[in-house]
Image (cartoon, rainbow, N blue to C red):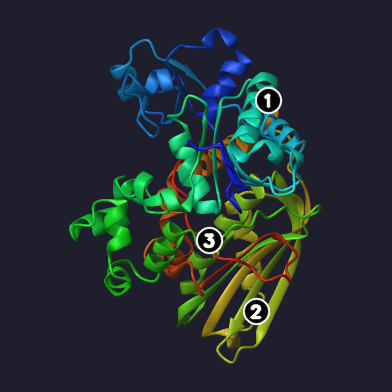
Amino acid sequence: MSSVLAVGTTICLVDVNAMFASCAVIADPSLAGRPLAVAIDPSDRRSIVLTASYEARALGVRTAMPLGQALAACPDLVVTPPDHELYRRSQRAMGALLERFTPLVEWVSIDEAFFDLQGCPALAQGAVAACVEIRRAIRTELNLPVSIGVSTTRFLAKMASHIAKRESSGVFQLQPADVARVLHPLPIEAFHGIGPKTAARLRAFSILTIGQLAATTPHQLTSLIGQVGNTFQADLRGDGSATVKVAAAAAKSISHELTFAQDIAGPDDLRPILLALADQVASRLRRAGLAGRQISLTVRDRAFSTHDRQLTAKQPACLTEEIFRYALTLLARFPESIFPCRLAGVSVSGLVPMAPEPATLFDAPGHAKRALAETVDQIRQRYGDDAMLWASTLGSAGQELYDSTRHGSSFRTGAIADRSEPGFSRRRKKAP
């Protein structure tokens, strides 16, 4: 691992190792060094393991494994429930620490953030030495174990962060010139952005390693997995994004829009799509710790005329079923002449901080719904947006929202931004 700074080698990805388990150790230091799992309901053997400590992983415990199976593999397993507020506190504390080194910090999930060291005083000692210092500060001040990847692009920094987990320093720098040596021998499943379905398809055509993917002709790769294949090869060449996006100081709205491959004939066909849109918006709201009072529905008809309706909710909403219910109310206010339609979008504005988790027995039903929603968020962060879907969206155009191979022109997200700003496409991230 070189400590020499290459031009442009300032993009870094910091990943908290087994964050939920690591936070459980912060809350109870006696758990340090013990096989530990975080599960939705520790008393229910049918519950799902959300994450496991490295001690538990060494004994066969895996994320998404049924708890009963995990206990069979590791009878001494300590099981704790998730603590979402603790995770958010740890994330905020780590964000504040990173901003001591650079103002360019972008969170991509609760346990991962990109940051850019360009122009920062710490970079004078070299990128690797700077990241070793950052990692030591996070461990010393926050008691969080992290791995940091360093490179010239976001993709290469992400790949470097996986390799960093095996480094004694916890930091790995990946230069574009070293990609063939370091990444090409790895199995195709190790490629960030390639999920199980795409990997299986590539393997069926004897593309087993990252090197074989790089050597495949663009035409053949496109015929196998679509235009995303060109993006994969560009990432390996070091041509990917090198931008760290800093969140706006105050979000105005969170929205999702979908342009359909075929026009939607009527409201019955549109409802499952609105559910998928509401689900994506709700997930973004919770990830940002926000809820909103104004719910808007946008529909564009075949003649390219855009129609909008909006209502104000009695209570700020951040759950899929709430936003979907309001979207259906708004849909009933449109004239039938909007159909067939070619685009639909759901937006939530009037944003406020999400209310703290209820502490009384009387609030238990609402608490259970939100806890379930946040658990689904955690699973999706690890396995992709299509890891868990609402049954009503299956077989509908709404699935386009979860299909990483179609996140091109048909998919647009306003993320956390002013509604008037153009959205951006996003490729699905693999599990940390």
Q: Position of residue 357 (x, y in %)?
A: 69, 32
Left/right of residue 153 with respect to residue 312 in the rendered view: left
Q: What's the residue at 61%, 57% (across, down)?
A: 281
Please give the residue where the numbered disc 1 appears in the rendered image. Answer: 137
In space, the residues marked 2 and 3 are separated at their CA atoms by 17 Å
Name the residue carrying label 2: 334
Crowd class of label 3 (few under 14; some 14 to 19; many from 20; radius 10 Å): many
Quarter where residue 406 is shown: bottom left
Residue 350 percent coordinates (x, y): 79, 57
Q: Position of residue 138 (x, y in %)?
A: 66, 26
Secondary element under disc 3, as helix, strand or loop, is: helix
Neighbourhood count class around disc 2 (C-alpha, 10 Å): few under 14, some 14–19, many 20 upward: some
Q: Are marks 2 and 3 in contact (CB under 8 Å)?
A: no
Residue in the picture at 34% in, 18% down: 71
Above or below for 233 versus 120:
below
The mark nearer the N terminus, 2 or 1, is: 1
Towards the viewer: 301 or 232: 232
Mark 2 or mark 3, which has the lower sequence index? 3
Q: Nearer the viewer, residue 164 or 16?
A: 164
Task: Name the amino acid type tagged 3.
Answer: Leu
Query: What is the distance, in whole Å, between disc 3 and disc 1 at their CAs?
Result: 43 Å
